Amino acid sequence: MDDHISIRPATDADIPALEALIPLSVRVLQAAYYTPAQMTAALGPVFGVDRQLIRDGTYLVAEGGGEIVGCGDWSRRWAVFGGDRDRPGEDAALDPAADPARVRAVFVRPGWERRGIGRALVAAAESAARAAGFRDAVLVATLAGEPLFAACGYAVTERYDVALAGGVSLAVVRMARRLAAG
């Protein structure tokens, strides 16, 4: 298997592949941290494609072996996670001089984990956020994602539960990192 990975902005044509990759990644790579009920309830409201970020050019895909093997995004928008399925309209824009960028999600195809794809997606997201004038970044990590983000320099600022449909909740970790001096 070719391990060469390239990262590029996602396009609308990638949406079907992303909609297949995200649940697969969640159900396999998060299974040690969350119950099947938690993962099912989180697909969509927490784990999902955000078409607004694709339009913004901030949703990224990692390609390897001729297929999409990972995706991740950053945002200049208010929301810190989630797909756009239940969002009624466009999310409000952030002010790079006053607000931190959002590093929103990283998903890797099972079988491709532990090859640096997550780190590469985070680095590309941070580089783009810096170029857009953001000095800081925040994110809400899953328990499975916390070690990746900690290794990328993010510090835990809060642990809490996200309420989901059916009385289910999902433990998550708010993390932050300084991107640039100033």
Image (cartoon, rainbow, N blue to C red):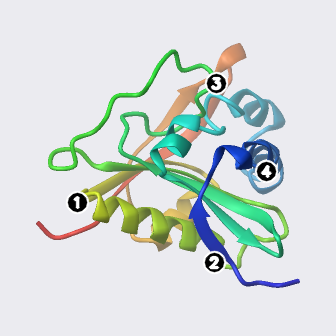
Q: CA distance from mark 1 to mark 3?
A: 29 Å
Residue 112: x and y, percent?
79, 71
* Label pair 1/2, CB-CB below 8 angstroms: no
Asked if 28 appears above or below 150 in the picture, the reply is above
Of mark 1 and mark 2, the one earlier in the sequence is: 2
Asked if 74 appears above or below 16 in the picture, the reply is below
Mark 2, Cα crowd under 10 Å, few <14 / some 14-19 / many 20+, is some
What residue did someone put label 3 on?
A: 85
* Label pair 4/1, CB-CB below 8 angstroms: no
Work out which quarter of the rendered image holds the C terminus and state it. bottom left
Mark 1, Cα crowd under 10 Å, few <14 / some 14-19 / many 20+, is many
Q: Nearer the viewer, residue 43 or 146?
A: 43
* Label pair 3/4, CB-CB below 8 angstroms: no
**Helix, strand, or loop for circle 2?**
loop
Q: Residue at x 74, y 51 (%)?
A: 30
Q: CA distance from mark 3 to mark 4?
A: 16 Å
Q: CA distance from mark 4 to mark 1?
A: 31 Å
Of mark 3 and mark 2, the one earlier in the sequence is: 3
What residue did someone put label 1 on?
A: 135
Residue type highlighted by circle 1: Arg
Q: Nearer the viewer, mark 4 or mark 2?
A: 4
* Label pair 4/2, CB-CB below 8 angstroms: no
What residue did someone put label 2 on?
A: 116
Residue type highlighted by circle 4: Leu
Of mark 4 and mark 1, the one earlier in the sequence is: 4
Residue 127: x and y, percent?
38, 69
Residue type highlighted by circle 2: Gly
Q: Horizontal placement of 130 versus 41: left or right?
A: left
Q: Residue at x 58, y 36 (%)?
A: 51
**Helix, strand, or loop for circle 4?**
helix
What residue did someone put label 4 on?
A: 21
